Amino acid sequence: MARSYRAFAPTRSLLGRQLRSGHIRCCARCVVSVLALLDEIWLLPGVAVNLTLVINMLGALLLGLLVGYERSYHGRAAGMRTYGMVCMASCALTVLCIYPQHWLGDHSLSSVDPTRVIQGVVTGIGFLGAGLIMKDGMSISGLTTAASIWASSAIGVLVGVGFYGAAVLLSLISAGLMMWGAKLEARLPSRPALAIVLRFIPGYVRPHEARLREIARERGYVIANGSFAVSFEQGQLEWRFVAVAVKGQQSARINDMADELAQLEGVAKFQMAHARN
């Protein structure tokens, strides 16, 4: 029995070495295949294009935040998050169309026009975002949501054509803007705006517009030019306007402003809310 075991020992050893060498060759082929795939997708020109796209997206984001802060400072509905996302996503799609030769791992796309697909995506998502924007009087909601959905379409396009690094960056920045953009706006100097609606009792003498502007000025607000609107329905007069805080002056709290408006003669009902998204 021992002699038989010694007779088969070389055969078992040879079989083990063959199995190990087979595993090594299989692993080597897998590594070579992965490296070939990475080399095909992440060629040096492709990395340079991704870097260019990332730099352009960051620059567009800063410009969008700058424009958004200017709008937010003046009490407009769209703020820094909305402008930042729209500007960054637009830049991503624009730069993407400049380098079609690097799409899908540097394959030739001379026989097709892939930009038409992007045009269809942008148009369709634009209609979807428009349906999310709600307007109630002078207050607007849903702008940031619409911008984020439109930005997510840009992320999908970037992933589809192989710009993975730029897609990851766009995803992180979009999520960060939605989570912390409002906190950043709250810490920066701003001029808050109030959307006010006054309804008067039929037959009562309404206050003069000059008196209303004087009351707002005493509370640290000024009625924005071009925002004053008057309507008359079912015998009831209604005034709508936007009061913006005066620059460099301490504005009153919204409760104090409400108490002052409630004391006006002839006012049957009023509504007041921050004119922000």
Image (tube, grey):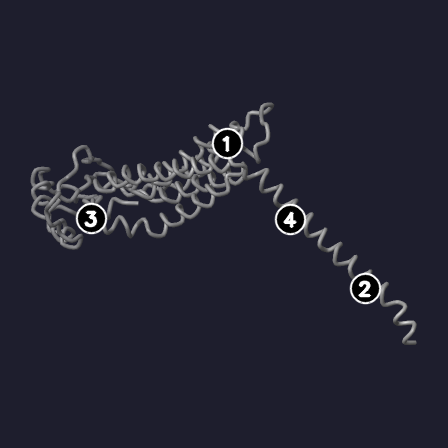
Q: Residues within 10 Å of mark 1 (few under 14, many from 20)?
A: some
Q: Which of marks 4 and 1 is nearer the N terminus?
A: 4
Q: Which of marks 3 and 4 is nearer the N terminus?
A: 4
What amino acid type is highlighted by mark number 4?
A: Val
What amino acid type is highlighted by mark number 2?
A: Ser
Choose top left, top right, bottom left or bottom right for residue 207.
top left
Give the alpha-carbon distance from disc 1 to disc 3, as whole Å: 49 Å
Quadrant location, the N terminus: bottom right
Q: How crowded is mark 4: few (under 14 residues within 10 Å), some or many (20 or more)?
A: few
* Circle 3 residue: 269
User: Which residue is located at x 67 percent, y 49 percent?
Assistant: 30
| Residue 254, image x, y percentages | 18, 52
> Where residue 36 is drawn, which disc sits there?
none
Q: Is mark 3 on a helix, strand or loop?
A: strand
> Where residue 118 is drawn, which disc sits there?
1
What amino acid type is highlighted by mark number 3?
A: Lys
Nearer the observer: mark 1 or 3; the answer is 1
| Residue 53, image x, y percentages | 43, 36
* Circle 4 residue: 31
